[in-house]
Amino acid sequence: MKQELLTVAQFKERYQISHTALYRQRNAGLLRTIKIGASTRIRVADAEAWLAKLSGGAA
């Protein structure tokens, strides 16, 4: 099963969030990220779940 991954830059552009805010969300346990070597990636499913939590499930 193939999962779509976003780079940090793609995530920031798609959700209009700053670099600092993204890592605050991650460090607070609100957004899951994965490491692939030295790169950080975010599963689209995790990004959508994060957005749904922020918007109270309306997304």
Image: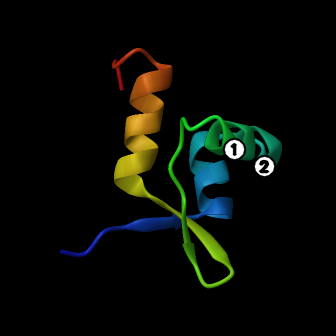
- Left of 58 or right of it: where is 1? left
Q: Residue furthest bottom?
A: 37
- Assign the N terminus to one quadrant of the image: bottom left
Which residue corresponds to mark 2? 19
x, y percent for residue 7: 59, 67
- Assign the C terminus to one quadrant of the image: top left
Q: Judging from the image, what secondary structure is the residue with disc 2 in?
A: helix
* Amino acid type, label 1: Leu
| Quadrant housing residue 30 | top right
Q: Residues within 10 Å of mark 1 (few under 14, many from 20)?
A: some
* Amino acid type, label 2: His
Q: Judging from the image, what secondary structure is the residue with disc 1 in?
A: helix
- Name the residue located 59 percent from the left edge and 54 percent from the top edge: 11
- Name the residue located 53 percent from the left edge and 43 percent from the top edge: 31
Q: Are marks 1 and 2 in contact (CB under 8 Å)?
A: yes
- Left of 4 or right of it: where is 22? right
Q: Give above or below for 39 relative to 52.
A: below
Judging depth in this view, the residue of 51 and 38 nearest the camera is 38
- Name the residue located 57 percent from the left edge and 49 percent from the top edge: 14
Q: Give above or below for 33 relative to 58.
A: below
- Name the residue located 38 percent from the left edge and 37 percent from the top edge: 49
Which residue corresponds to mark 1? 22
Q: Count of labels shown? A: 2
